[in-house]
Each structure stands twice: as structure tokens, then as C-alpha cells.
Image: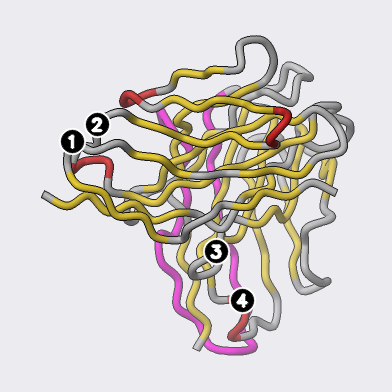
Amino acid sequence: AQSVTQLGSHVSVSEGALVLLRCNYSSSVPPYLFWYVQYPNQGLQLLLKYTTGATLVKGINGFEAEFKKSETSFHLTKPSAHMSDAAEYFCAVRSHYGGATNKLIFGTGTLLAVQP
Amino acid sequence: GAGVSQTPSNKVTEKGKYVELRCDPISGHTALYWYRQSLGQGPEFLIYFQGTGAADDSGLPNDRFFAVRPEGSVSTLKIQRTERGDSAVYLCASSSFTGRPGDTQYFGPGTRLTVL
């Protein structure tokens, strides 16, 4: 069975500071990994995804994440936080081998606050 | 429309009543997913359609929940004899289907269901 753990349900950073949101996964097969962002009263928006190839993935709004198989991690980073980055962030995993379903398994989310 | 739309945006009902939630996927997307997001949690998978058929309904919590997609486009999630524990945000997502698990799922804004 696959699962995702997001460490830290709430993270607070100052504007201009580094953003680091942690995600660890469990999967018996090579995973496909995703980061989604959810702004208040809005749907989930894809930030970035790792499928195959380069382990450092760049996404929208200056975010990036690195797939580290040895650490079973896919942490999300951004060098300099903006006030507009305040939102909830979800890490998700999907089975690499496909099969009958392409369902996503989400973590419990990390709420990012950005202080002026 | 340009994105996934869901109606209604909010639904308040009484315990024991029947409700229907509607999802309009992105035009041309053959894959459609329903998820449920409870307060403070990540989305949880309910059901996945490929075309008109439910390819995976393993996430439906019990037989009070049912979903249809009769023409391979719009989908309706139906909940019978609602319970207070059904209160959550119900999210719909769609994707084009290339047969690869890396296909991006695009989410709608959700329907917030409150059972009194």
C-alpha cells in the first residue's frame, strides 16, 4: 500500500525567507509524486510533478522539489517566500504501474503562513 | 468551460435526506475522479471513471454512495440517507487519458456539503 506523510501541519515563514515543506512517501513500486496547492475556497492546483527522469523538478510560482529515492522524500522548496504563497499544500503519490486506477493518495496537508 | 466546474458550490441538507452533486469535466477529458476532503484532512479518493464506466469504486465508503457518468462527460455523485459524518467538501477532477499514470488531474472548486 502507498502512503504519504507530510511533516508539519502548519509552517510559518517570513516574507523573503526560504520555504521548505516536507513530504515522505511509502511505495513498493517506483512512485509518481505530485505537489498541489489549495487557496481558500478554491480547488487544488498542480504545482509540479515527478514521473521519471530528472529528480529535480521545477514547477510554477518558483517552487521546486527533489525526488530522493534513498530518503523516500519529495520535499517542496522555494528560495524566497511571497505573501501570495500563503495557502495549503498537499503532497500526493500515485502508483507507477497504473493498472485499473490512477487515483491519487494525498497527505494531510501543510498550511503555509507568510509573515510580513 | 475552461476548467472543471461543480454545482452546487454549497449544499445544506438534513440528516436522512438524499443529495446529488454534479461535476462538469474539462471538455474532452475521458477520465473523471471524485474525492472527499474532510476538515483538516487531505482529499480521499472515492471513485474513478474511464468514459462511462466506473473503473475503480474502491473508495466509496458504503452503499449509500453512488456515482454515474451516463454519457461519458458530466458525472453525478449521489448520497442516500445522508449522515452528519458525510459533511465534507466533495472534489471532482478530470484528466485526459494517455494510459500513463503521470496524467495531470485538474480539480474543480468543490461542493461543500453540510448535513445538519
Query: Quick check: do tags 2 and 4 share a chain?
Result: no
Q: Which residue is mark 3?
A: B41
| Disc 3 from disc 1: Cα separation | 28 Å
Q: From the viewer's perspective, is the residue at label 2 or at label 4 nearer?
A: 2
Q: Is residue B19 left or right of residue A46?
A: right
Query: Quick check: do tags 3 and 4 share a chain?
Result: yes
Q: Which residue is mark 2?
A: A80
Residues at marks 2 and 3 touching, judged by CB atoms closer than 8 Å: no
Q: Residue at x 62, y 49 (%)?
A: A106
| Disc 2 from disc 1: Cα separation | 4 Å
Q: Position of residue A85 (x, y in %)?
A: 27, 41
Q: Is residue B41 left or right of residue A63?
A: right
- Nearer to us in this view, A59 or B114: A59
Q: Residue at x 70, y 36 (%)?
A: A72
- Magenta segment boundaries in residue numbering: B1-27
Chain to which the residue tagged by mark 3 belongs: B
Residue A16's disc is 1
Q: From the viewer's perspective, is the residue at label 1 or at label 4 nearer?
A: 1
Residue that lies at the very extreme toward the left in this rendered image: A116
Residues at marks 2 and 1 touching, judged by CB atoms closer than 8 Å: yes
| Disc 3 from disc 4: Cα separation | 14 Å
Q: Does the segment drawn in magenta span residue B13? A: yes
Residue type, mark 3 in image:
Gln
Q: From the viewer's perspective, is the residue at label 2 or at label 3 nearer?
A: 2
Q: Quadrant of residue A74?
A: top right
Q: Residue at x 79, y 46 (%)?
A: A2
What secondary structure is found at the residue carrying circle 1? loop
Residues at marks 3 and 1 touching, judged by CB atoms closer than 8 Å: no
Chain to which the residue tagged by mark 2 belongs: A
Q: Does the segment drawn in magenta span residue A115? A: no
